[in-house]
Image (cartoon, rainbow, N blue to C red):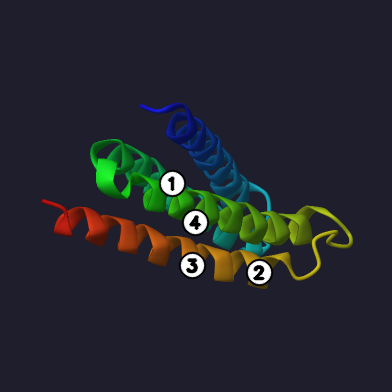
Amino acid sequence: MGRTTAIFAGIAALLGAIGVAEAAAAAHSVSNPLLKTASNFLIVNAAAIIALCAFAETAAASSRMLRIGIAVLLLGTLLFAGELTSHVFLPHSPFVAAAPIGGTLTILGWLIGAVGIFRHARAP
């Protein structure tokens, strides 16, 4: 695996671990539904990022597009879940408007990833 995609996959694995920890907290001690939403978001997008990283390694023609999509998806996930989590644990969120920006970036990351995959499918 290339260095960039390995770093992205490693960060995604950390996000998945954080998501599982948040799910445990949401199930056992924190009743705020935002924590469960953040947990689900982290776990799902972490798995998607790892899958896209693996695919990027086999898709030489479109791997740059995929790496861009992965980076955007990673940033969007961090911003969205980070703001939701900060609302649960901090009195005032320091990330004003991070959730809508993160959500938009996450959608964009998924779309860029799809373009990269479709480009790979069209390659000879």
Secondary structure at badge 3 equals: helix
Quadrant of the image containing the N terminus:
top left
Which residue is painted at 50% across and 55% down in the image? Answer: 73
Give the mark nearer the N terminus: 2 vs 1: 1
Mark 2–mark 1 Cα distance, whole angstroms, equals: 20 Å
Q: Which residue is mark 4?
A: 40
Disc 1 vs disc 3: which is toward the camera? 1
Which residue is painted at 51% across and 57% down in the image? Answer: 41
Which residue is painted at 76% across and 56% down in the image? Answer: 86
Which residue is painted at 77% across and 61% down in the image? Answer: 87
Q: Which residue is mark 3?
A: 108
The percent coordinates of residue 9 (x first, y second) are 45, 35
Give the crowd class for mark 2: few <14, some 14-19, many >=20 residues within 10 Å: some
Q: In this rendered view, identify the residue nearer to me: 11 or 41.
A: 11
Identified by mark 2, the residue type is: Ile
Give the mark nearer the N terminus: 4 vs 3: 4
Q: Which residue is mark 1?
A: 67
Above or below residue 49? Residue 86 is below
- Is residue 12 found left or right of 60 in the rendered image? right
Numbered label attached to residue 101: 2
Identified by mark 1, the residue type is: Arg
